[in-house]
Image (cartoon, helix red, strand yellow):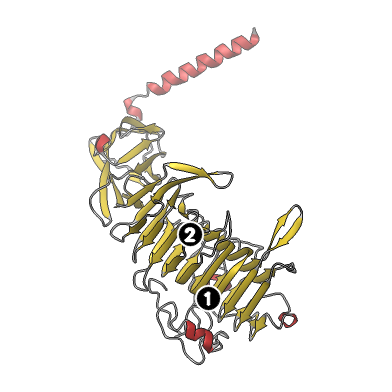
Amino acid sequence: MIKNKILNFGILFSFILIIFFSCRKEDDFNNSSSFQLKFSTDTLVFDTIFAKVGSATRKITVLNTSNKAIKINNIKVIGGNNSPYQINVDGRAGNTQNNIEIDANDSIYIFANVTIDPTEKNNPFVVEDNISFSVNGNQQKVVLQAWGLNANYIVADDFDRYPTFKLHYKIVAKKGETVIWTNERPYFIYGGFARINGKLIIEKGTKVYCYAGTGIWSAPDAAIDINGTKEEPVIIQGSRTTGFDKDYAGQWNRIMINESNQDSHINYAIIKNGVIGIQPETKRIIKSNKLYISNSIIENHSIANIYAVASRIQGENLVLGNAGQGGVFLRNGGDYSFKQITVGNYSKTSRENPAFYVENWIKKNNQQIPFDLNLFIGNSIISGKNTGEEYFDTIIPSQTTTTNIKIQNCLLSTSRKIENFPDRYINTIINKDPKFYGVENEIKNNNKEKETPMYFELTAGSPAIGIGDPKIASEVPKDIKGNNRALPKPDLGAYQSDFSPKLSPIR
């Protein structure tokens, strides 16, 4: 009985409060015709976004600086329901809102987002509208502005199991078909992977933007050729092109290349900000196909820049920059040749894995089963902020497998005693600072801001200058920027030093 009385009193009290506040007198409001709202910004600018896909939500704070409450008679998006912008006013969705009250010295939030319809324009275009505010007969506005970008959309419409989970995809090249992506418009991959069953050729200057969880999948017996140039590299990255999060790692998934009867080629590409940059991986049976990759920058991936499983790679003039969990992983054996590459992992994230990790085995039934492994690294740099950035986890091969590792004229960060492996390490310098341009300020000054791309060119006094093997350099006679290597005393790594780094498209 007592509980019922308390409950009835609570209901009655709440009802009285509702009546009290809903009957606020006009004298309680600031009715001055000179009153002005204050906004957190007068122009709400959105990142560059893609037609059809939409944007992140942005927020405006609307402040009442008066000592009395105010009533906003009307808040509306000028374009109404036909506007590409949509707003939510203090929890109320809709592009027109009436009689919005703000208490004295208080504020409300307006959340806005935008979806841009496709147009025939190939270049970025500006889409604008306004939010208008009517208070005491006065009109104020906040400008809404977005840079829209039209694109060729690759939207997943099917899925496969790879091997046990669903992998969503859209087939972009059928079996036996060759498809060319041109640079007229960027490509936007959404909802899954762009799956290649035939062959995909990506022309110079093409930009590919990948939404969260997406990527490119060269399926078994398919191939991909990326044909960038020094002046017009192919760029593959996440869909965030501007704003505070544009350089965040993990924005998209990876480029996956399976076993095939065709080789794949990547030349002059910038691949960045994914989970894994490139993942050549054998799932069914090891075939003779090889990935040729040259003159490319692969950087700022949340796990690794290259993650290869029982694969064959020939890499030249590569910059493999920061990665969250390692840098390069070569697993289950394989056949690899790297010449004039720079591996530098100074990522601000804490990691246990080295910048360059190799293993020649797989664990099965609690036993380590060895695989064939052939690895050559010449005239290259492997360095980073940790001790021991190179680690070869190899077991004694069986009578039916072989392991051949040769590291020649390289600068390495390693924790092993290389004198115990005289046939493996030839003319190798260990544990010296390569003096990269751009690393000094970012790392040694303990810059804790967001991850940013680094420039791994050599500065004066670098121990990597002039100690390369001329024969190896003659096989890769120009550096990643097209400069001639200094024979007979070439530098190590992807860049030939000139002590004045010019940040060109391929850096």
Which residue is at the front of the view, 225 or 288? 288
Alpha-carbon neighbours of circle 1 within 10 Å: few (<14), some, or many (≥20)? many
Residue 218 horizontal/vertical position (percent): 47, 56
Q: Which residue is mark 2?
A: 273
Please tell me how many numbered marks the rendered image carries.
2
Q: Is residue 413 left or right of residue 139?
A: right
Residue 11 versus residue 153 in the image, above or below: above
Give the residue displayed 51% in from the left and 66% down from the top. Answer: 290
- Residue that label 1 marks: 341
Report the side of 305 relative to 146 (left or right): right
User: Could you say which quadrant of the image residue 328 lies in?
Assistant: bottom right
Q: Is residue 386 left or right of residue 347?
A: right
Element type at marker 2?
A: loop
Q: Quadrant of residue 181?
A: bottom left
- Residue at 71% x, 80% y is 418
> Can residue 192 be seen in this snapshot?
yes
User: Which amino acid type is shown beneath numbered disc 2?
Assistant: Asn
- What residue type is disc 1 on? Ile
Q: Which residue is at 51% across, 64% downward?
A: 289
Residue 239, visible in the rendered structure: no
Q: Secondary structure at mark 1?
A: loop
Question: Looking at the figure, which quarter contains the N terminus?
Answer: top right
